[in-house]
Amino acid sequence: MDANIKKQLQIKACKVRMGIIEGVYNAKSGHPGGSLSVADILTYLYFEHMNIDPKNPKWEDRDRFVLSKGHTAPALYAVLAHRGFFPVEELKTLRKPGSMLQGHPSMKLTPGIDMSTGSLGQGISTAVGMALGAKLGEKPNRVFTVLGDGEIQEGQVWEAAMFASAKGLDNLVAVVDNNNLQIDGSVSEVNSPYPIPEKFRAFGWNVIEIHAHSFDEIDAAFNAAAEFKGKPTAIIAKSVKGKGVSFMEDQCSWHGAAPNEEQYNQAMAELQAALAELEA
Amino acid sequence: MADIIKVATRDAYGKALVELGEMNDKVIVVDADLAAATKTGMFKKAFPERFFDAGIAECNMIGVAAGLATTGYTVFASSFAMFAAGRAFEQIRNTVGYPHLNVKIGATHAGISVGEDGASHQCCEDIALMRSIPGMVIINPADDVEARAAVLAMADYEGPAYLRFGRLAVPRINPLDYKFELGKGVQLCDGNDVTIIATGLMVNEALIAKETLANEGINARVINMHTIKPIDRDIVIVAAKETGAIVTAEEHNIIGGLGSAVAEVVCECCPVPVMRVGVEDTFGASGPAVEMLKIYGLTAENIVEKAKAAINAK
């Protein structure tokens, strides 16, 4: 992809990561690990790929996004804020009484949230319904959803996967954020979902494998998915849980824990340094 | 006397969906491999492009219905009550109820009158489950006329609703020009000794019980409570004040259904004896529907017995 666009996306993604840390630190709870692993893909979708209008979040013909792994809402909120759906200041209200930023996404409260999620395995079904609705209405819009690799242990994911391919929903893209960790340990230790690409292929999907932190690979994958006809596309994205904050990287313990003040300062210093380097 | 017409409410549901489909091209129906039994097959035949079979996967079906609803469609999602309210409870709670989406759950084969299929398919817990979801409307029609009217009315209502239909053909009690009003109980006959508040196929039993009681000099009021949520508080409070005793009758566990809803209102607003006719917190079993209704205490005789007990408890 264009070097300048890539640089801008990297800068945005860095700011999104700072928004994640800011939100989770102020909330004193939340899920930083999986938020950081999905940050680049969400940044790409909202700043580069999806056809959306922050001024008109309910625009009928917009592309839709469903965060099936709803616990990583801090990443989606940070992306939406930086994209202009609401003020970045709001991120500090995450999980607080009266905030529009609930612990898990609520489509009734937050501009830009297309579906309320949080209970794992359910978001993908709603994305399938949206894709079906678009096909039925002969609309050009497309639907994107992101699943966790632990989430695909839920049987409903495969009910949805079977249905989506049976209906030929090529306007649907499901990303699996394959950071290899879930609450109780590595996904293979807990209840292995591997091999993931083969499973989606067996369910009749077009499958693309990428590294989740390479904008070149992300861009190529989503553009290929847009061109692919006849089947839904699954993008299996190898990611690093906690990506961008050294002490959170690849650590299961950072799935659902907030940093203390010292850790917050260190995380923000690391991200500031990365940002300064990108902007230099 | 005119012959009694008997029609299953599921049949009326299927026909009403076709009517709706003709009037409104935004109506979509999804089912989970039970279209022949739930009668959504009628809609499938009439509007194949607007019918989607999720296969035997109710949880995904509810999610797909929710997603479709966000794109501007009015979606009816059908299965047996056991697998809609039961298996997909959490999907209904989290992806339909919480975002308050325009999905109507058309659940058929509710209650003990499923008959021969037995306990695994006789859902007597669905009203309790659906009542616990904030903002969920619950309708249990008494006959085919009311079932049709309720389906047409709910298509114009924006938000989640649970419509409960039966497998068994039941007597028609309403006139063809019956007007359905959401959340408004219907007083079918007046009385001042006791009030029978019934829902679904138990409304007809309540009317028979009224006659039996009348022969014994007891004057019973009969109310058809087609909408269980939101419950018609006013009609319950007036009945409690004016008749001083209430019997509820439903084809559902006595826990969590109509009886509970009525008792909650009566306890809070005008305490009088409330006796409940329903499935006595037990699982069903195989057998012909009408026989099962007798075995599980869901007849006019059971209502008469409880009515007398309620009057004695005044």
Image: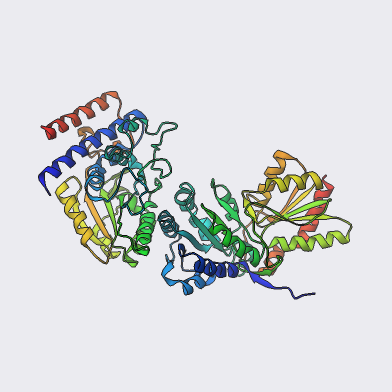
Q: What is the tally of numbered marks visible in this picture?
A: 0
**Residue A33 sits above or below residue B161 on the image:** above
Q: At x 56% / y 64%, what residue is drawn? A: B108
Is A78 displayed left or right of B17 in the figure?
Answer: left
The structure residue drawn at horizontal position 61% and vertical position 63%, both measured from the top left corner, is: B149
Residue toward you, B248 or A76: A76
Camera-side residue of A176 and B75: B75
Residue A167 location, quadrant: bottom left
Q: Position of residue A190 (x, y in %)?
A: 32, 48
Residue B132: horizontal and vertical position, in percent?
56, 47
Q: Residue B101 placed where, x, y %?
A: 47, 51
Quadrant of res B234: top right
**Residue reaching furthest right?**
B217
Please say if B35 is above or below B235: below
- Left or right of A224: which side holds B277? right
Is B255 in front, or is B197? B197
Give above or below for B242 relative to B46.
Answer: above
Picture layout, residue A10 above or below residue B189: above
> Is residue A183 visible to us here?
no
Q: Is residue A227 left or right of residue B300?
A: left
Is residue A274 rendered to the left or right of residue A251? Answer: left
Residue B34 percent across, percent down from the top left: 49, 69
Q: How is the image coloured?
A: rainbow
Quadrant in which the C terminus of chain A is drawn: top left
Is residue A26 among what the camera can see?
yes
Rendered residue at 23%/44% (across/down): A47
Question: In the current view of this chain or complex, which residue is farthest to the top?
Answer: A262
